[in-house]
Image (tube, rainbow, N blue to C red):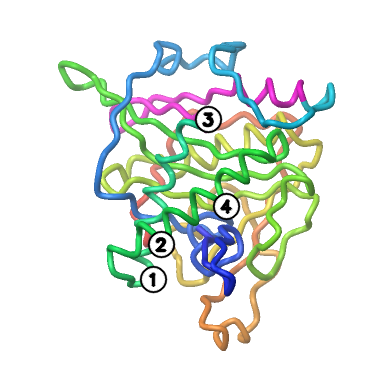
Amino acid sequence: MAATATATTTVALSSSDHQIQTLTPSSRFLPFAKSTFTFRLSSSAHSHSHPTAAHHDPIHTGRFLSEDDCRRLHALETFLYTRHLPSGGSLSVRVMRPHQIHLPVELLAHSFADSLLLPAAYAAFLGYLISRYLSDRLALMPHAATLLAFFTDDQQPQPQTHFAGTVEVSFDNRGANASVPAPPPPKDAPYISNMAVHKSLRRRGIGWHLLKASEELISQMSASREVYLHCRIIDEAPFNMYTKADYKVVKTDSLLALLMLQRRKHLMCKKLPLLSMPSETDLSVSDNLNTT
């Protein structure tokens, strides 16, 4: 994922060497926090129906919205991507609500701390920065959104639902991150970043479905068919996943990135079909990726 602290101690979750390395456009998955979160979702989370108007958890941005923005915000509120996993269990992906910010915060904070080889105690400070960042991103809806994935192990006597991963999506220039890794994507194009999958839930295809859910939501929210993301050159597993999903390398970071102590990255792009419907198959894509 691409998250980093800038010189002014702000988090640029889309412009740091870590940020996209995850999936942020970077195609890397951040490792999850060691703790596991358990939830109970409504029965609709286990169905395969397309997002419906389950307007039970409205999103508030705290600012005036145009009629078009209200329509788009409603689409985010009702978005639900669900799939049964070949390895067992089911996955549901929906847009993060304000009261759920702590879930990706802890995951990303521990992921960044691990990838930067920082002491575990530093994760608390990173968590503060990431929390501020995600709060600011929430205010940009419906031009950007953070998706949360929940895994339900239905093979247990009493099935429980666990927080499984996250990914961030911007739909246009109003939702674009002010600081993104080089080479930069077009400001007005949809952009996928900051993807992370819980370490204990990898190798189940969850990363693949986070990518597919992002594409499905972009198809609903943006008129642009070209979607961009970054992938670090050293991240072979994410790169293979993106390639399998039909993303193509359009530009690669120069060697100057190494002088800035950053990993070189590919900028990748995919042109979505007019109606992008995610595949029902898992494609057996591995989530066993390094942290970003």
The residue singled out by tag 2 in the image is 112
77 displayed left or right of 125: right
Mark 4 or 3, closer to the camera: 3
The residue singled out by tag 3 in the image is 97
Q: Which x, y percent locates residue 189?
A: 76, 49
216 displayed left or right of 100: right
Q: Which x, y percent locates residue 58?
A: 60, 19
Helix or strand or loop: what does disc 4 sit on? strand
Mark 4 or 2, closer to the camera: 2
Alpha carbon separation for disc pair 3 and 1? 28 Å
Q: Which residues are magenta?
A: 70-96
Mark 3 / mark 1, whichever is N-terminal: 3
Which of the 4 image quarters holds residue 124?
A: bottom left
Q: Amino acid at mark 1?
A: Leu
Q: Amino acid at mark 2?
A: Phe
Q: Is residue 211 above or below residue 61?
A: below
280 displayed left or right of 229: left
Residue 91 in magenta stretch: yes
Q: What's the residue at 62%, 11% (across, down)?
A: 53
Helix or strand or loop: what does disc 2 sit on? helix
The residue singled out by tag 4 in the image is 193
Could you tell me if the residues under marks 3 and 2 are in contact, i.e. CB atoms within 8 Å? Answer: no
Could you tell me if the residues under marks 2 and 1 are in contact, i.e. CB atoms within 8 Å? Answer: yes
Q: What's the residue at 43%, 59% (across, down)?
A: 126
Q: Amino acid at mark 3?
A: Arg
Assess disc 1: are there few (<14), some (14-19) or many (≥20) residues with their C-alpha within 10 Å of its C-alpha: some
Disc number for residue 116: 1
Alpha carbon separation for disc pair 4 and 2? 14 Å
Alpha carbon separation for disc pair 4 and 1? 18 Å
